[in-house]
Amino acid sequence: MTITNQSPLSLLSAPPKRSLSDEVVDRLREAIISGAMPQGERLREETLAETLQVSRGPIREALTKLEREGLVSISPNRGATVARLSREDLDEVYSLRFAMESLAVRLSAKTGDAACLAEMESCVHKMGDALAHGADAIRKTAELDVRFHKKLVQSCGHKLLLRHWTELRPQIHWLLLKRNISDPDFRDYAVSTHSIILNAIRDHDESRALTELDQHLRGSYTRVASSYTKTKP
């Protein structure tokens, strides 16, 4: 029997590089969430491949991933289209989001990660800056809003919860952007409501943090829901 002194590090391989389909996913996701590709638009593989200068294989893989995220619909007859988030989809996203973030708040109010809480505070300050300067405030505030809530979930240390929240993130981002476009009054409350939630968590006041989160998410839900009513024929 031969015993070698091979280092455990020699068994490790370099981390895999991002696949081409991952790069395509990022480009398409950004176009969908920003509204550059509106709901219902056909996503033809050949056209996308030509535009992004890739083969149709990565396009097909990317569309499948975006379907799992709820941003793309694929049917045998029409192929791939940008998904239409129905009122029922809105209800499901927000009810699930409330359940997950309520758990995050309860855990974070007890032993929240200080680094994550600091990043949440940074998001709030950047929201204020984006709103003060005005340029592209709608998009920037939506991005910072999503980042704040991701850090909230991350702060509680529940890895499985973070994984499932991240799967929901693209739809949350899309709906927040829709909210900001529909109701410019987000400028009046974006900074204050997030600050209140963060302060309650830092004070380890679970009850107040849950109450503030409930009001925050219900307000966001109501504003998005009203946009469905406004666009209803």
Image (spheres, grey):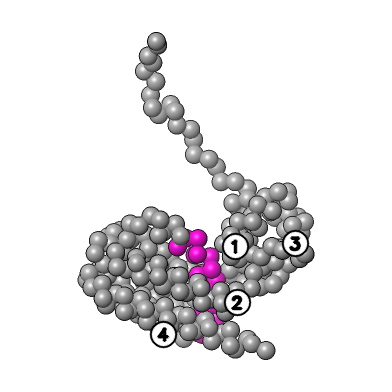
- State whether the magenta stretch is mostly helix, strand or loop: helix
Image location (x, y in percent) of residue 112: 28, 62
**Which quadrant does the C terminus fall into?**
bottom right
Q: What amino acid type is highlighted by mark number 4?
A: Asp
Q: From where the camera sits, is residue 45 visible? A: yes
Q: Which of marks 1 and 3 is nearer the N terminus?
A: 1
Frontmost of labels 1 and 2 is: 2
Disc 3 to disc 4, C-alpha distance: 45 Å
Who is closer to the viewer here, 94 or 175? 94
Q: Earlier in the sequence, mark 4 or mark 2?
A: 2
**Residue 146: mark:** none
The answer to whether 187 is drawn above or below residue 156 in the figure is: below
**Residue 86: mark:** 2
Give the class, few, some or many, for how many residues have Cα within 10 Å of label 4's Cα (few <14, many ≥20). few
Q: What amino acid type is highlighted by mark number 3?
A: Pro
Where is residue 147, by image quadrant? bottom left
Q: Which residue is drawn at 38% across and 68% down?
A: 101
The magenta segment is 165-183
Q: Earlier in the sequence, mark 3 or mark 2?
A: 3
Q: What amino acid type is highlighted by mark number 1?
A: Arg
Kindly identify which residue carries mark 1.
29
